Image: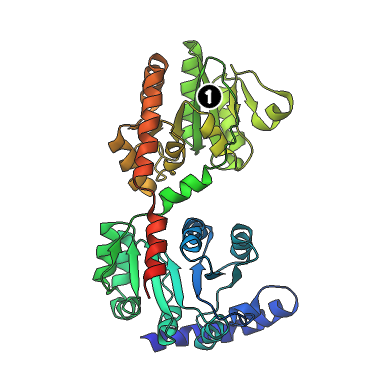
Amino acid sequence: MLFIYRMIFIIAVIVGSPYLIIKAIWGNHGIKERLGFIRPRASGGRLFWFHAASVGELKVLSAVIPEIRRILPDIEIAISTTTASGKKRALDLFGPNTIVFLQPLEINSAILRAIENLRPEKLVLIETEIWPLLIWTAADCNVKPYLINARMSERSFKTYRWFRSIVGMVLGRLRLVLAQTEADAKRFAALGAPAPQVVGNTKFDQVFLETASPKQALSSGGNSLIFVAGSIRRGEDRIFAEIIARSQKSDWPVFFVLVPRHMKDVDELKAKLRTRGVDFALWSDATKSGFDSEEVLVVDTMGELTSFYRSADLAFVGGSLVPIGGHDPAEPAALGKPVIFGPHMENAGMAADLLLRSGGAEVVRDADAIIKALEIGLKNRPGLVDKGRRCRDAILAVAGVSRKIARILAEDL
């Protein structure tokens, strides 16, 4: 089976070779790196090679690698990424003292060449990055392969079962699988991974890194309760336009801040507000000329959601009133904010369940439920503060996974 897998990749490279040659001649597209031509390492110290396919895996490493460097100050780190944009992001995150390169192709000679030039002690893959030939070749070269923050959905598990023979052979070469949950560990074990360990999810460490900046978008909402609806999606804009219109008729002291998930949805959000007769200000204008705290604030700039969550008295997490799967509630929770979200939280189920159990979060199923949450918050501001503390304590209680992973990697000889 592994032979067939190799042949498929070799054929793909042969078919695509004219394109690869053109790219190599007329652009800096990392063809040499993909063929394993990485500058040979000068030193002879310990080196761990991490593979991060995308920004998501790089976020995991942003929490794990600093912990490893604290334990092993002299360790050298190499990171491979799948894309050029990922490579740039890795360089921005980890700096010039880290070897960063594009992932070698799944061809034996390219992987061997990379291993020869790097001379790594360990190869560390992240979450679902199962590259059969990379794992197999590393193990054959006495490079210990690991899978950290490992996860496997039920859907992926059903797919992998069709290829149980090859998947089992590959997973069997892993030194350790460090899984996020018991369910993940059981799925990996069923496919042939040797004794997966459950250590938890690094996402709760990542969120503390991401919220470390003290930047706060709003210094005050006056006497109003600041309600931030973050990452709202199409369909939710209509619901919030209705909520705000009803709130303003009742003359509630609530300052609404609406932060769409995608900037392309801003115009539609504005149209929904106008339809309900709601006056609003755009954040891009307000930063220049100021705004009235009695207006609704629509955030039409990217990358500022954390600073708005920091300003909130109550936070709503979007993508959850519509069947999209929900966005991550851990960010406002880590900032000590009480959180509400809709019933569709499949994509962030672990964090949602954690916060609901803490008593700091609440499920709201429609406009009426959100209005009720606002009414309760207005009558009991200390209660909101208490719920925010519960949320933060819940996140703190499950943090520290990155340190556990780093210690295992450092001490497993």
Q: Nearer the viewer, residue 32 or 232?
A: 32
Q: Is residue 295 above or below residue 107?
A: above
Count of numbered marks: 1
Q: Is residue 129 above or below residue 250?
A: below
Quarter of the image where the N terminus is located = bottom left
* Residue in view at x 65 percent, y 65 percent: 96
* Residue in view at x 37 percent, y 66 percent: 408
Spot the residue most to the right: 26
Any part of residue 127 in sight: no
Examine the image and state in which quarter residue 117 appears: bottom right
| Colour scheme of the rendered structure | rainbow
Q: Nearer the viewer, residue 135 or 317?
A: 135
Residue 50 placement, left or right of 371? right
In percent of width and height, residue 37 lies at 62, 83
Examine the image and state in which quarter residue 36 appears: bottom right
Disc 1 residue crowd, few under 14, some 14–19, many 20+, Cα 10 Å: many
User: Mark 1 — residue?
Assistant: 256
Q: Is residue 143 above or below residue 150?
A: below
In percent of width and height, residue 201 lies at 37, 54
Examine the image and state in which quarter residue 321 appears: top left
Quarter of the image where the C terminus is located = bottom left
Any part of residue 338 in sight: yes
* Residue in view at x 51 percent, y 48 percent: 209
Label 1: element kind? strand
Residue 208 placement, left or right of 95? left
In percent of width and height, residue 93 lies at 59, 58
In percent of width and height, residue 185 lies at 28, 63
What's under tag 1, amino acid-wise? Phe
